[in-house]
């Protein structure tokens, strides 16, 4: 036991003072952080409090959107043959309409044909009665 060092009262007092100083520094730092936190505007605090709910709602909306997109893609895949058929038919239908317009123009240029038209109201067998 001869090699053991026994602390003097002044050493104990200095260590205690050092611990008190460290604790006071920790308290000062905590107060500085707390006062810094107190300077946050109340609206920002409310937004920060609502953030988890907003993120959850966004995740839910994104999930619903993805499901809707998946359904739309499935419907479009099923409707694709119909669209291809319409793409093939539309030029033929346009040609038929064009031909019909040309026939109508040629017939309307013939004198007296307007009297044969039942929709014109001018002539035909109904006008003689």
Image (cartoon, rainbow, N blue to C red):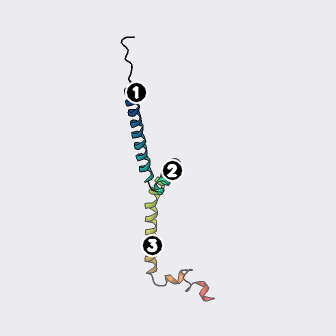
Crowdedness of circle 3 by 10 Å Cα count: few (<14), some, many (20+)?
A: few
Between marks 2 and 1 in the image, the one whose residue lies nearer the viewer = 1
Quadrant of the rendering where the N terminus is positioned: top left
Q: Residue 12 carries which label?
A: 1
Q: How far apart are marks 3 and 2 (CA)?
A: 69 Å
User: 122 or 88, which is in the foreground?
Assistant: 88
Q: In this view, does 101 lie above or below 125?
A: above
Q: Residue 102 got which mark? A: none
Q: Name the residue under label 2.
A: 49
Q: Is mark 3 on a helix, strand or loop?
A: helix
Q: Distance between the residues labelled 2 and 1?
A: 47 Å
Q: Residue at x 54, y 82 (%)?
A: 120
Mark identifier at residue 101:
3
Label 2 SS? helix
- The C terminus, quarter of image: bottom right
User: Residue placed at 39% from the left, 34% from the top?
Assistant: 17
Q: 102 or 54, which lies in front? A: 54
3D distance between C-alphas at marks 1 and 3 = 113 Å
Q: Residue furthest bottom?
A: 128
- Local crowd at mark 1 within 10 Å, few (<14), some, or many (≥20)? few
Residue 34: x percent and y percent?
44, 47
Residue nearest the observer in this picture, 44 or 25? 25
Q: Point out residue 50 in the picture as x, y percentages from the top left corner.
A: 51, 51
Q: Residue at x 53, y 84 (%)?
A: 115
Residue 117 percent across, percent down from the top left: 54, 80
Q: Pointer 3 and pointer 2: residues touching (CB < 8 Å)?
A: no
Q: Is residue 69 visible?
A: no
Position of residue 127 relative to residue 52, above or below, is: below
User: Depth-wise, is mark 3 or mark 2 nearer the camera?
Assistant: 2
Q: Of callouts 1 and 3, which one flags the residue occurring earlier in the amino acid sequence?
A: 1
> Which of disc 2 and disc 3 is earlier in sequence?
2
């Amino acid at each position: 036991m001869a090699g053991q060092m026994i602390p003097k009262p002044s050493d104990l007092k200095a260590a205690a003072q050092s611990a008190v100083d460290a604790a006071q520094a920790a308290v000062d730092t905590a107060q500085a952080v707390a006062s810094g936190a107190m300077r946050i505007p109340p609206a920002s605090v409310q937004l920060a409090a609502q953030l988890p709910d907003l993120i959850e709602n966004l995740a839910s909306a994104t999930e619903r959107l993805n499901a809707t997109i998946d359904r739309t893609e499935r419907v479009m895949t099923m409707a694709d043959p119909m669209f291809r058929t319409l793409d093939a038919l539309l030029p033929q239908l346009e040609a038929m309409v064009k031909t019909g317009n040309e026939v109508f123009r040629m017939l309307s240029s013939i004198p007296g044909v307007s009297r044969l038209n039942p929709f014109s109201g001018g002539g035909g067998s109904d006008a003689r009665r």
